[in-house]
Amino acid sequence: MSLKQTLYQKISTTLSDRIVSGEYPLGTNLPTEANLCEEFKASHHTIRDALKLLIEKGLISRRPGAGTKVIAASEPTVFAHVAGDLRHLFSYPQNTIRQNILQQHVVSDRILSQLLDCPIGTPWFKIGALRRLDGNSQPLCWTDFYILPRYSDVVKHKSHFSIPVHEQIEALYGERVESAKVKISLTKLDAEMAKELDVPSNSSALRIVRSYQNVQKNAFEITVSYHPEGRYDCELNFHRELRPR
């Protein structure tokens, strides 16, 4: 059983139907706010709420002095990726074990700056680690963690090897992940990394770069993972969602 629509919702639905039917063609203006108030016997506040719904649907735009313009003849649809939290962003089985192989301070050169999308000369604290299903199994991947030097004490976190590094940084320093970016590419493994992963040198691998950014849009952690062929499966879930243009 559907809930009864409010007046502004009814007005919004009526105007939307007129836009979709072509009564208000693409690129034209809707009647003025005063005219809509008179037609629907509604207050200016109610009309504004109705128009706000149409803006949220991506059907109209409003600018002072330019009126209310029809910018779409149908509601735009996108398919959004669903992730319960950042642990599900190309995540690993919960029973995997991470083993740190190296820890060092580095400064990005030309090649590293291109990989991490950061300026040349940016200082990082680097952690190189292997991930396995258990202590004796074949490695699943090699991951290089690049974190801001001021957060290097995450290696002393009591759960350093069992929870994601970005969560440790949040817990220890109050840094907050506001957004995350993922890049995927195919690469070849050099001899040293191939040896650690127990595969032939120059083997193909999936490279996944994850960048964790704070509210200022600055990356405070970037991870680069290398997955040999046949050792990684990924499943993404998407749902249909309406968004304004």
Image: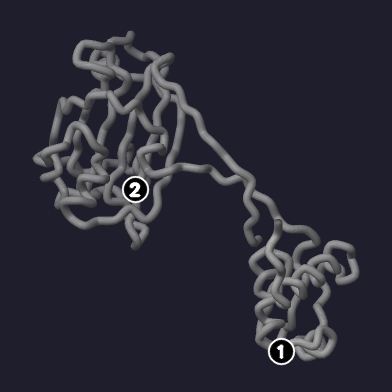
The answer to whether 198 is drawn above or below residue 38 in the figure is above
Looking at the image, which residue sits at the far front? 1
Pointer 1 local density, CA inside 10 Å: few below 14, some 14–19, many at least 20: some
Image colouring: one colour
Judge by depth and name the residue closer to the eye, 94 or 216.
Answer: 94
x then y, percent, for residue 33:
75, 86
Quarter of the image for residue 25 reads: bottom right
Quarter of the image for residue 166 reads: top left
Q: Which residue is mark 2?
A: 212
Q: Residue at x 24, y 49 (%)?
A: 122
Q: Residue at x 73, y 77 (%)?
A: 7
x then y, percent, for residue 172:
16, 51
Of mark 2 and mark 1, the one earlier in the sequence is 1
Q: Residue at x 50, y 29 (%)?
A: 235
Q: Which mark is residue 18?
A: none
Q: Amino acid at mark 1?
A: Ser
Q: Which residue is mark 1?
A: 43
Q: Residue at x 67, y 81 (%)?
A: 48
Left or right: 182 as drawn, with respect to 120 = right
Judge by depth and name the residue closer to the eye, 181 or 4.
Answer: 4
x then y, percent, for residue 211:
36, 45
Q: Quadrant of the C terminus?
A: bottom right
CA distance for labels 2 and 1: 46 Å
Secondary structure under the numbered disc 1 in the rendered image: loop
Q: Quadrant of the N terminus?
A: bottom right
Left or right: 122 as drawn, with respect to 31 = left
Quarter of the image for residue 61 reads: bottom right
Judge by depth and name the residue closer to the eye, 230 or 122.
Answer: 230
Left or right: 40 as drawn, with respect to 202 = right
Which one is in front in this view, the residue at disc 2 or the one at disc 1?
1
x then y, percent, for residue 145:
25, 37
Q: Amino acid at mark 2?
A: Tyr
